[in-house]
Amino acid sequence: MLTRRVVVWQSQNQTWNIAGYDFYYINRDDENFDHEWDVEYTDDFNFVSIGHETSEDAEAAWEGANHGGAEVYEWSQENAKDCELLDQKAAAYLKHEQEQIKSAFASYGQRVGR
């Protein structure tokens, strides 16, 4: 299984969320290229699931490769800024995904004459 970078965090409303970071491969021309380890992560998400009752429920929503453990941020005064930033990133990702779906349906409707 592949290992991927994942973050789990608690929002101020006490729900738990999970997100996976997007990545790209490096060293593809190297004879020792390893699709698991020869990656660089971006600051963008490629998966988000929000609103879970527990951190375990959030982790169970992960649909990707074995992530080998997630960074976990429980809501606290110390982690509030990190959790809020993750909430904002998740909201932006979900908005983008929703726009992609709307665009795909609009395109499909044009192709079938609706």
Image (cartoon, rainbow, N blue to C red):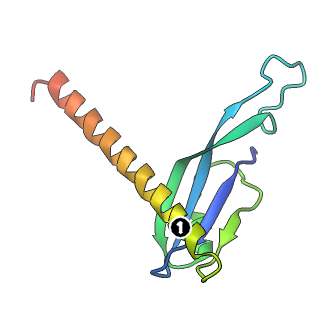
Side of 9 where 39 appears, left or right? right
Screen quadrant of the C terminus = top left
Q: Nearer the viewer, residue 43 or 56?
A: 43
Q: Position of residue 95 (x, y in %)?
A: 36, 51
Q: Position of residue 51 (x, y in %)?
A: 45, 71
Name the residue rendered at 53%, 67% in the picture: 17
Name the residue rendered at 61%, 83% in the picture: 76
90 w.r.t. 45: above or below: below
> Which residue is denoted by mark 1 in the rendering?
17
Name the residue rendered at 70%, 64% in the picture: 71
Q: Position of residue 40 (x, y in %)?
A: 72, 38
| Neighbour tally class for label 1: few under 14, some 14-19, many 20 plus, Cα within 10 Å | many
Q: Secondary structure at mark 1?
A: strand
Side of 8 where 94 appears, left or right? left
Name the residue rendered at 38%, 45% in the picture: 96
Q: Residue furthest right?
A: 32
Q: Nearer the viewer, residue 74 or 105?
A: 74
23 w.r.t. 16: above or below: above
Residue type for callout 1: Asn
